[in-house]
Image (cartoon, grey):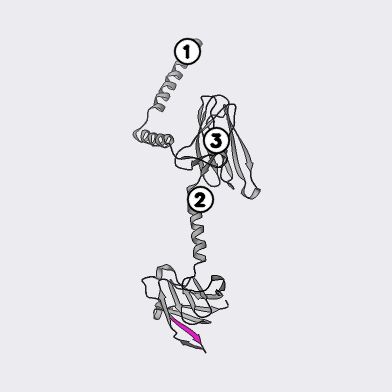
């Protein structure tokens, strides 16, 4: 076989291999087709888009793949969450799309901006941004004249975090039963010992003492309270209301006891700890 014939045969063989591989790549198994379909539905989802401050287009993070429209003669500013550190920016088409980082804000809560610009209209590609907090999957489209000047995100976990902070502040300021302002209460009590019902807080209004237990104590047998006076354990009047024990005595030292023998649990309360 001549060299020319050999090269021609080799070329034909590569064409056959390429065509076979291309056909195999286009065919999909049932699971592959299902996965591609599910991903397509997520990418095609409309999602929530709202108007933010200063004309910013706001997407709800994670709801769907946001589609950001840019224009060759303009720049798109995609702003990430303040304090978020960008690890990697991966773009499907790195030749016709340019992405450059920028920053804003003080160093402590600095926000990263991704400045996006396409080279021509009619382009569609995808971008993945990995950060210290999450991963963004964004679709990029280019239009002849229309574009989104500023893009940002709302984060569902922010709402939960803010709600938890509000609840914590409310709980911290909650002083059930006390009839005086919280600033007039004394919280200088030390609680020692181990028990499943160990008090979470003890305070006094000068006349009565309030012992707050975990909420799980509701429906259970409350421990017995003894006030330590003159080296002896004395019983004083007290009552339970939900998770709060109200003691008709301004105690300096007391013990709470539940159970007997090896099941006995004891908590000691001291003023001035």
Q: Mark on residue 158?
A: 2
Query: In the picture, residue 56 is in which quadrant?
Result: top right
For marks 2 and 1, give the one nearer the viewer.
Answer: 2
Query: Which mark is on residue 129?
Result: none
Vertical arrangement, residue 106 with respect to residue 184, above or below? above
Q: Position of residue 266 (x, y in %)?
A: 45, 78
Q: Kindly identify which residue carries mark 3.
A: 90
By secondary structure, the bulk of the magenta-drawn segment is best described as: strand
Closer to us: mark 3 or mark 2? 2
* Residue at image point 42% right, 19% down: 16
**Residue 228 is a magenta residue:** yes
Magenta region, residue range: 225-231
Label 1 crowd (10 A; few <14 / some 14-19 / many >=20): few
The disc, 1 or 3, on the residue closer to the chain's N-terminal end is 1
- What's the mark number on residue 8? 1
**Does dot 1 land on a helix, a strand or a loop?**
helix
Between residues 3 and 78, which one lies in front from this camera angle? 78
């Amino acid at each position: 076989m001549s060299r020319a014939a050999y090269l021609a045969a080799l070329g034909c063989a590569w064409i056959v291999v390429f065509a076979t591989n291309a056909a195999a790549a286009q065919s999909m198994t049932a699971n592959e087709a299902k996965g591609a379909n599910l991903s397509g539905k997520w990418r095609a989802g409309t999602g929530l888009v709202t108007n933010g401050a200063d004309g910013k287009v706001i997407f709800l993070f994670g709801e769907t793949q946001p589609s950001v429209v840019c224009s060759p003669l303009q720049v798109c500013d995609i702003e990430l969450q303040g304090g978020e550190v960008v690890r990697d920016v991966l773009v499907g088409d790195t030749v016709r799309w340019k992405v450059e980082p920028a920053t804003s804000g003080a160093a402590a809560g600095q926000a990263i901006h991704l400045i996006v610009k396409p080279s021509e209209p009619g382009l569609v590609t995808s971008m993945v941004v990995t950060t210290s907090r999450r991963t963004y999957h964004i679709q990029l489209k280019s239009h002849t004249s229309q574009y989104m000047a500023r893009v940002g995100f709302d984060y569902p976990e922010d709402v939960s975090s803010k709600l938890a902070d509000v609840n914590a502040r409310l709980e911290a300021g909650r002083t059930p039963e006390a009839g005086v302002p919280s600033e007039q209460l004394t919280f200088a009590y030390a609680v020692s010992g181990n028990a499943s019902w160990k008090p979470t807080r003890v305070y006094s209004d000068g006349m009565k003492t309030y012992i707050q237990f975990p909420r799980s104590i509701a429906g259970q047998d409350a421990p017995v309270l003894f006030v330590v006076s003159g080296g002896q354990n004395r019983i004083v009047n007290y009552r339970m209301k939900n998770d709060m024990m109200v003691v008709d005595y301004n105690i300096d030292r007391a013990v709470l006891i539940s159970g007997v023998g090896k099941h006995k649990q004891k908590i000691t309360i001291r003023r001035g700890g």
